[in-house]
Image (cartoon, rainbow, N blue to C red):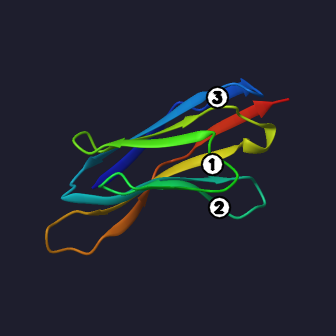
Amino acid sequence: QVQLVESGGGLVQAGGSLRLSCAASGSIFSINVMGWYRQVPGNQRELVATITSLGNTNYADSVEDRFTISRDNAKNTVALQMNSLKPEDTAVYYCYADLRTHWSSNANRYWGQGTQVTVSS
């Protein structure tokens, strides 16, 4: 059983900052990529940022230079530091992890429950 638990969402004014955290726990052998998506009701889920186990990062153009993704491999956690927030960043943010539960298993994607981020203008 694998769980991803998120924390850190909330309400913030435009220009402010929030930090999201996500911790993976359970039967984990290894984690490859971790990342964050976001979704506005009625829209498709949008990739925000990813980070590999080696620390290579990738960002959506809309958040480049404002958001920073980081992870702690020893603790199986990933964080998203969001600065200079805009009203259009309002969404439910979901963390994910592509991980293996056993040395012989294929990697599967696991998701967090989602956390609401609301940016007021």
Identify the element where label 2 is drawn. loop
Disc 3: CA contacts within 10 A as few (<14), some (14-19) or many (>=20): some
The structure residue drawn at horizontal position 71% and vertical position 34%, both measured from the top left corner, is 85
| Residue 95 screen position, x and y as percent | 48, 50
The structure residue drawn at horizontal position 55% and vertical position 46%, both measured from the top left corner, is 114
Residue lying at the far front in this picture: please name it.
65
Residue at numbered disc 2: 45
User: In this image, 86 relative to 17: left or right?
Assistant: right
| Residue 76 screen position, x and y as percent | 29, 45
Q: Is residue 30 above or below residue 76?
A: below
The structure residue drawn at horizontal position 41% and vertical position 42%, both measured from the top left corner, is 70
CA separation in Å, label 3 and label 2? 19 Å
**Residue type of the residue flagged with mark 1:** Glu
Residue at numbered disc 3: 10
Identify the element where label 1 is drawn. loop
Disc nearer the start of the sequence (3/1): 3
Identify the element where label 3 is drawn. strand
Disc nearer the start of the sequence (3/2): 3
**Residue type of the residue flagged with mark 3:** Gly
Residue at numbered disc 1: 64
Locate the N terminus and report the quarter of the image it occupies: bottom left
**Residue type of the residue flagged with mark 2:** Arg
